[in-house]
Amino acid sequence: MQLGMIGLGRMGANIVRRLLRHGHECVVYNRTAEKVRQLEGEGAIGATTLDAFVDKLATPRAVWVMLPAGEPTEQTIGALAERLQPGDIVIDGGNSYYKDDVRRARLLAERGIGFVDVGTSGGVWGLERGYCLMIGGEEQNVRYLDPLLVALAPGRGEIPSTPGREGLDARAEMGYLHCGLVGGGHFVKMVHNGIEYGLMQAYAEGFDILRGAGAPELPEGHRYHFNLADVAEVWRRGSVVSSWLLDLSAIALAGDPQLAGYSGFVQDSGEGRWTVAAALEEGVSAEVLSAALYTRFRSRQEHTFAEKVLSAMRFQFGGHTEHTGAGG
Amino acid sequence: MQLGMIGLGRMGANIVRRLLRHGHECVVYNRTAEKVRQLEGEGAIGATTLDAFVDKLATPRAVWVMLPAGEPTEQTIGALAERLQPGDIVIDGGNSYYKDDVRRARLLAERGIGFVDVGTSGGVWGLERGYCLMIGGEEQNVRYLDPLLVALAPGRGEIPSTPGREGLDARAEMGYLHCGLVGGGHFVKMVHNGIEYGLMQAYAEGFDILRGAGAPELPEGHRYHFNLADVAEVWRRGSVVSSWLLDLSAIALAGDPQLAGYSGFVQDSGEGRWTVAAALEEGVSAEVLSAALYTRFRSRQEHTFAEKVLSAMRFQFGGHTEHTGAGG
Amino acid sequence: MQLGMIGLGRMGANIVRRLLRHGHECVVYNRTAEKVRQLEGEGAIGATTLDAFVDKLATPRAVWVMLPAGEPTEQTIGALAERLQPGDIVIDGGNSYYKDDVRRARLLAERGIGFVDVGTSGGVWGLERGYCLMIGGEEQNVRYLDPLLVALAPGRGEIPSTPGREGLDARAEMGYLHCGLVGGGHFVKMVHNGIEYGLMQAYAEGFDILRGAGAPELPEGHRYHFNLADVAEVWRRGSVVSSWLLDLSAIALAGDPQLAGYSGFVQDSGEGRWTVAAALEEGVSAEVLSAALYTRFRSRQEHTFAEKVLSAMRFQFGGHTEHTGAGG
Amino acid sequence: MQLGMIGLGRMGANIVRRLLRHGHECVVYNRTAEKVRQLEGEGAIGATTLDAFVDKLATPRAVWVMLPAGEPTEQTIGALAERLQPGDIVIDGGNSYYKDDVRRARLLAERGIGFVDVGTSGGVWGLERGYCLMIGGEEQNVRYLDPLLVALAPGRGEIPSTPGREGLDARAEMGYLHCGLVGGGHFVKMVHNGIEYGLMQAYAEGFDILRGAGAPELPEGHRYHFNLADVAEVWRRGSVVSSWLLDLSAIALAGDPQLAGYSGFVQDSGEGRWTVAAALEEGVSAEVLSAALYTRFRSRQEHTFAEKVLSAMRFQFGGHTEHTGAGG
């Protein structure tokens, strides 16, 4: 099957590579031509303008947009709307907000163009492991793309079957899922990332407490100097907290037990915020997912204004200057 | 009535001054003699050794210990236990842990010495406003000290009466309260401080959000440049959030609207931690009080180890280097 | 000065009453005629249709809309847009979302009609105490309304002046403030309510911990039976946590120390959610304000789905059935 | 090698079974004789009194205590202290508090008896998968027990090696780890469980948000009805959030997508609380681990007293009765 790919960053390029390995044909376009030439060298058909890209695709076209959410995706889908034909399908494989999907799908639908949103998890490991795909859109569009999706997904692998799944959607066991209507793929991916933040923070706090157990102010006998690399490793086997994120922690800690190579400045992508925003709309308590997000906000500031307000109040009511011990 | 005071820091010295103003007699002792001499100049009877201090007090003695919690208080009460007589009363007016009160009271009780714990709120404003006193101990001991307690408390003042209090403890309306058995005064003071942290953090976050409304990345039309000093001031009148802490915020912001004079390094005293520990023992959800405490812990670190763990995981799964935009 | 009021619920009616007391003229309209008649009896000029209401107002008209946020306000402002004239001013005194203000102001501006948003705090106490007013809009519109605003505000009262306010906006000391451009009044009111949730939750957790200190499973000697009404009362005098919300808690606890008359089902208005949403947009950590909001969400459910997920996981990994003691 | 086991609950009995399968000899004792007889039938040597149990063990004895933390473990270790001989080793494989380990180890050391604490993760799956063992104690004692520990641990299995572990403790890769001095095993296990609570809560909130996406009050087009069993399944393959806990969620949701069989009443064991207590002692911010714990506390109450305080305040300041819409 043929796919057009717009955006040859790490994710887009690797998706093309995985499709090529599975025998699919890929027409590729990127803002800068160098990446196009590189993938041509790996078997893709390159295009250096959007018009040429559209021309090289057989109808009905399947065009995967793999660009940063926001303006780049917005403009590209707008440009495609003017160039594609009824029956073509636009796939947004990036990290768009699901409400943008719904809006864009309506715009495209006015011209008879289909829209499918695909939340894609897998990072740099996806080329080899396959990508976990969370898909939203109309049934017929998703079915049409199935040969591509199954090629990108990890497949069953050696992961044990879940008992009791007889009669449920077999695609989920292959690592891809048609989650629901337009936006549904990105909604599920959004929550996936929200959970991811929570999981990461849980491990991070745990390792921080383990490390803090060696603090010199703790009483002797209750002070421990744990080897965090070994702790991460032992938890990988038979423990309740084993996970892929733990595997990654074990790798990082084995190489740098103090994590001295990291400053601890942590970005957040839109999904974490959108997950909390969705919880607010639904009236769902998202204590942990919110707390995990806020620690990232905090990590990027030297001091918050809130902290200065606290200092100022303390100075007013108690004459406490900062750095002094007495509180309250 | 006569009181002996050990510890002439800001709080101890001002308590002595307030008692002297109300016509009570104070015998004072401090590790450094200079503060003793200063209060002698204000009408107190000074002592430069603990033995002399004890000798100068009439029996049954009432000895107020106003020292930092932990070792200083522990050692002083131990030294008093060896010098006082049955019928004397030791008052711990500092910020001791209530479980330490219980232990110390048992020790003193073996020698017939009474123990009263007094949680004291009021800071530098207490000398003029009076101190809010939360008291634990046996009824007879607390009653015996009543003349001193009523002098230290703020009294009714111009604060409107609470309807429906007929038949309840009238002392609460004077600003002092016998809360319960030994440790009960410090327990109530502990929770008071836990609440204080929560209140302060609520205001602090609110002002941070108001300030953040002017961030240049927000869309025009939805961007506001609020004068925080004026906002704090307007809330002092007729709003639901009016409070003494807000009054203090208004003072601080009027003088320094950017709070540029504060770094935002915020200490916590033991009470915040003990409050959360009590919640854990009781199985009470203390989301806000805990979160408020953690922001203080966080304010004192450049980066947490937890944040480095997050950075390390992100690098492993996505090749994300720090400071780059793309997340999760 | 003359004001037209649409919406004669408790807040709208009391605002009219306070203006009448200060000698202003009020034309009033309400969906149901009964409330109109009642205020006519108190000196207002009634109107039973929107057209009649508009006719009875002298130009340039000042029309205060005091309706629930969302549809009622939306429709009424839409209907006013079709009936008012250039130079008239619409005031939204309800709890609208600031982004709706901006949108509506643009709509009205196309017809030359001004818009002012007024966040109003004061509840049932406002009629006597005055209302704390947070105001957004263009300077000339806000200035024009000044005679009404000053009448509604609490005024200086007996509240001590904040030192250092020389040269700052004197209106803030009267209890009303022009906060900024359109939407700015509701933004400040929104954050005010967000803070209010945090303050309330801080007290609530504190009282819960005090009450939990009497739990029978705690060891004797570390178990306390506090009189919460007395504790709330004593904190009203001289303590750091004194506030109007504490005054209210003292009233409630004096009348019903167990709060047995309340089920604990707690609503949230939009402002709490919007405050957190604003924090998300700004990248501000709002740990306490979020946690306070989530406890309200949680209070309205028997059990969350999240809790069922926890139960299900525990059953799978440990064979734990619910209600058994052994954990994780 | 020979091991004595006290406590034949699910965990104790399965540990014996796994050791028997690996050719070790087990002497077993339990308060009720029936379980002793059952394991005799599976190859163990039974004892019906503690004295007989001690007699049947060859010196130096290795005695594994697998009882509930607290009184049962305390009393049993006390009874063993009186019966064992210098050179014998007591192993506490339960969920004891690490500070209790330190105290008990000192007591045993006075009689020349060694002490090893083993945190054991694995639940009902451990018999087949092996147990993840976190071990504290003196090096010589842990080394002596190595044949038993390696038999209980899961071993390398098919889990990929962590790159960069050359030169690190090879036992961690077998699934057991000597973490440090006495108490260190239970400390690591404690934090493990703290993390577990955080991970579970992150998934739980995520599934709650996914489920809430179908709420009828959400606008059409932004409303989704996700099949949670399929979502859990698809995340098992190639996604960042894959984990053993997710596998278990997938099993639970496949069998009961609404989780209707669970009420959502969630216990917590001591470790979650102790983890937060350790964070408090160390001054580490544990936002997520605390929040996860508090949701469990909350799940076991119909309404908290804190919620009643909120209701009472709202009634006082706004005349809000419960269940009405208008807030703050």
Image (cartoon, coloured by chain):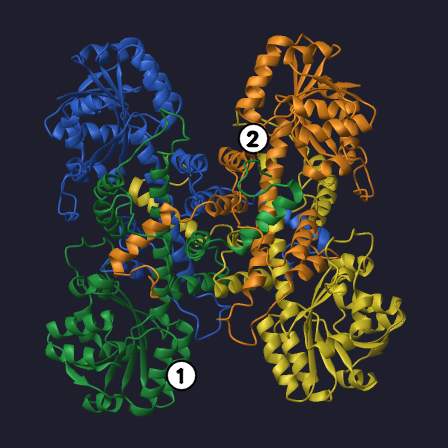
Chain colours: A yellow, B blue, C green, D orange
Image location (x, y in percent) of residue D39: 73, 25
Q: Which residue is mark 1?
A: C106
Q: Chain of mark 1?
A: C
Which sits in the foreground, D52 or A50? D52
Q: Is residue B164 above or below residue D49?
A: below
Amino acid type, label 1: Arg
Can I make out residue A320 in this image? no
In the image: residue D125, left or right of residue B215 = right
Image location (x, y in percent) of residue C117: 32, 74
Which sits in the foreground, D117 or A160? A160
Report which quarter residue D113 is drawn in: top right
Q: Which residue is mark 2?
A: A215
Which sits in the foreground, D295 or B299? D295
In the image: residue A165, left or right of residue B148 = right
Q: How far apart are the two marked residues, 2 and 1, measured between alpha carbons?
A: 59 Å
SS type, badge 2: loop
